Amino acid sequence: MFSFLKNHPFAVEAFFESSLVLTFAVPKVQLQNLIPECLQLDIFQDEWAFVAVAMVQTKALRPRGFPRVMGNDFCLIGYRVFVRYTNSRGKNLRGLYILKSETDKKKMEFMGNIFTHYKYTTTDINKIEQTNTLEIASIKSKFRMTVGKAEEVPLPEHSPFNDWKEARKFAGPLPFTFTYNPQTKEVLIIEGVRENWIPKPVKVIDYDFEFLRVLNLRNPILANAFIIENIPYYWKKGKTEQWS
């Protein structure tokens, strides 16, 4: 009855204290069945498709235009595939398709599942930040990662990219996020807007994500890792269109 509420019925804003993204490359055939029929994989060198793990610390997340004091602070974790969509006007849009979403607070799970299709679950998220390293882990979700901050960071070993300039194209954020209703063949398009988004490469010291194994991905290759800090961000009200 109230399913329309899930279509991002109003704009939302937040302040990103940090957004840490690890992007993994896999042969395109491994991801094709994970995205809906209306989307295409965003491919590199006609071979590689990409799935990313994003860990975002938000402050004052709230409907856009509401006072900052009414916002809430959350940690958000998203597992996303890099995709493309050709809209009804023939424009090719780069964006993301969400596979799984997690948060550290029940309130975000509750509200997120009313106003989005992202199927949030709540998990434990533990952070240990030291002078030169940041460790993030979850017992319930069975993931852990440790990254280091340094002035000079080499590309991850075996990355398909030749340099950081190429890697930056698959670092996010991509402008759009897509959701698809296969029964009605409606595509929901959410556009994100930000300023001064300057990703900084980070060195990945260690990582393990149970969810990547759940996806049955064979030997995903760490392709890049970036962090951004202190960025205002907002998502526009969702738009739907018919796909055929």
Image (cartoon, rainbow, N blue to C red):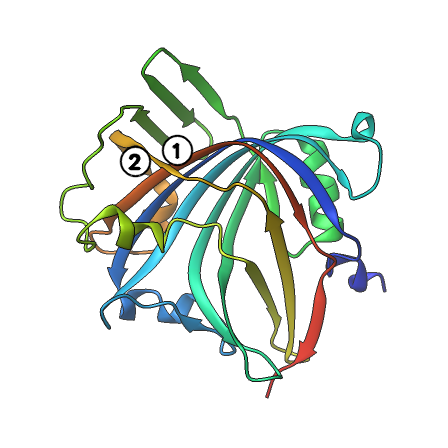
Residue at 52% x, 26% y is 124
Residue 7 visible somewhere in the drawing: yes
Residue 118 visible somewhere in the drawing: no
Q: Nearer the viewer, residue 184 or 194?
A: 194
Q: Residue 218: x percent and y percent?
A: 22, 56
Residue 48: image quadrant is bottom left
Q: Amino acid at mark 2?
A: Asp
Q: Amino acid at mark 1?
A: Lys
Residue 8: image quadrant is bottom right
Instruction: Report if the CB atoms under discs 1 and 2 are less than 8 Å apart.
Output: yes
Looking at the image, residue 71 sits to the left or right of residue 37; the answer is right
Q: Residue 121: x percent and y percent?
A: 59, 41
Instruction: Give the answer, above or below, for where 146 lies relative to 236.
Output: above
Residue named by callout 2 = 208
Residue at 20% x, 41% y is 155
Quarter in which the N terminus is drawn: bottom right
Instruction: Give the answer, above or below, for where 202 lies relative to 166.
Output: above
Q: Nearer the viewer, residue 87 or 232?
A: 232
Instruction: Give the answer, above or below, for where 170 lies relative to 188.
Output: above
Query: Could you give the CA–CA distance between mark 1 and mark 2, rounded to whole angstroms?
Result: 8 Å
Residue at 35% x, 29% y is 144
Q: Secondary structure at mark 2?
A: strand
Residue named by callout 1 = 142
Looking at the image, residue 106 sits to the left or right of residue 136; the answer is right
